Image (tube, helix red, strand yellow):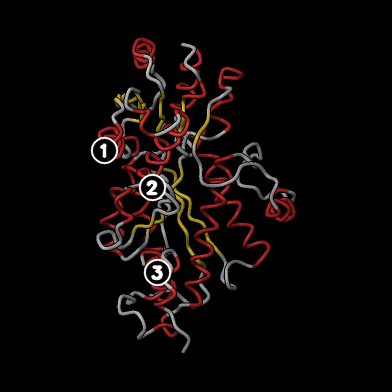
Amino acid sequence: MKRLFMTVSIVSALTMGVPVMADLVIPLLSSRTGPYAPNGIPYADGFTDYLNLLNERDGGIGGERIRIVECETAYNTRRGVECYENTKDEGSLVYVPSSTGITYQLIPKAAADGIPLHTMGYGRASAANGNVFTHVFNFPGTYWDAASILIKYIGGQEGGMERLSDKTIALIHHNSPYGKEPIRTLENLSAKHGFTLSILPIDHPGQEQKSTWLRIRRNRPDYILMWGWGVMNQVAIKEAASIHFPMEKLIGVWWSADEGDVLPAGAGADGYKAITFHGNGADYPLYEDLDEYIIGPGKAAGDGSHIGTHLYNRGIVQGLFLAEAIETAQVLRPSKFEGHCPMIRHGCRMALMVALNWSVECVKEE
């Protein structure tokens, strides 16, 4: 049912105070600067290039061109809130906060303003409860999902969940709302399966980790899970290699899964792995269109060095989800579904919330 609400929300933006053929305004709260730029740049480039592809190849979405309003946050929560306040009155359909800390601050604001947030694989995991969090959508996965999947994976590696009882699993995490999200789930799984859980926070921005890895060298956990971002990932992998921690037992969440995270460690990173929810590389038909309409003509968002990388593809996937939701919302403008769904009351933004949380029962042929 929750996917239904996101499409409904976008229909609201498409119809409230916006001319019929106005641009589809999609803000991007980016982090191209600061210590998190190594991860923020490819993600923002992929998102921008995909939406610009829709403009160049298709004329936008449903005949309406997309206008990306990028606002730099440097992964700073205060700046992220300022970006939201400065752009929300431009007819913004949906926000991509690109930060768990920013997401936490925007949840009440976006609900009050009737604007959906899509926090794809980040943000507040409990926002999956649509009865409480009506304007936040975090598919295709939450940090609770990731923590559960990783513990199940480790159990499989050990020959069964019952064999975790004498193991120690450490979590090194960015000391922020993002990094703290999996802790409660891991604590519950520790109580259920009997493994010892060690929590090791890494302070912003993550460049200084010597004391943490000295502790790891001394205690020798059996596995390490990493909830990192930006430079923290690069430093952690290099430190793990320097103490000869078995790299196949260091496993990252999907924000610690980019090529840029492992390259500084060189061969020392061999064996490192991370969970993810989409494919890598450029061996997809979509890249033929990107080459023809965006990369070849020199219209790419960046210098081209990140094209095909993991986080560049993450940005593409983010743009794809929003584009599909908007296209569905255009079909679901109020005249199409009025009377069928009592929760639909805010025009196009409301319809976007439907698309992001699709429910077939709610939309019927007239």
- Please say if the residues under marks 3 and 1 sit with CB atoms less than 8 Å apart: no
Other-residue count near label 1 (Cα within 10 Å), few / some / many at <14 / 14–19 / ≥20: few
Q: Tag on residue 142?
A: 2
Is residue 285 depicted above or below 304 in this figure?
Answer: below
Question: Is 288 placed left or right of 9 in the picture?
Answer: right
- Please say if the residues under marks 2 and 1 sit with CB atoms less than 8 Å apart: no
Residue marked by disc 1: 188
Foreground label between 2 and 1: 1
Residue marked by disc 3: 4
- Please say if the residues under marks 2 and 3 sit with CB atoms less than 8 Å apart: no
Foreground label between 3 and 1: 1
Q: How many marks?
A: 3
- Sequence-first tag of 2 and 1: 2
Residue 63 coordinates in the image, percent (x, y): 60, 73
Q: Quadrant of residue 307?
A: top right
Q: CA distance from mark 3 to mark 1?
A: 31 Å
Quadrant occupied by the N terminus: bottom left
Residue 198 coordinates in the image, percent (x, y): 30, 24
- Sequence-first tag of 2 and 3: 3
Other-residue count near label 2 (Cα within 10 Å), few / some / many at <14 / 14–19 / ≥20: many
Is residue 342 depicted above or below 83 in this figure?
Answer: below
User: Which of these two is toward me, 286 or 110?
Assistant: 286
Q: Quadrant of residue 336?
A: bottom left
Give SS at disc 3: helix
User: Which of these two is toward me, 127 or 296?
Assistant: 127
Residue 296 coordinates in the image, percent (x, y): 74, 49
Give SS at disc 1: helix
Amino acid tagged 2: Thr
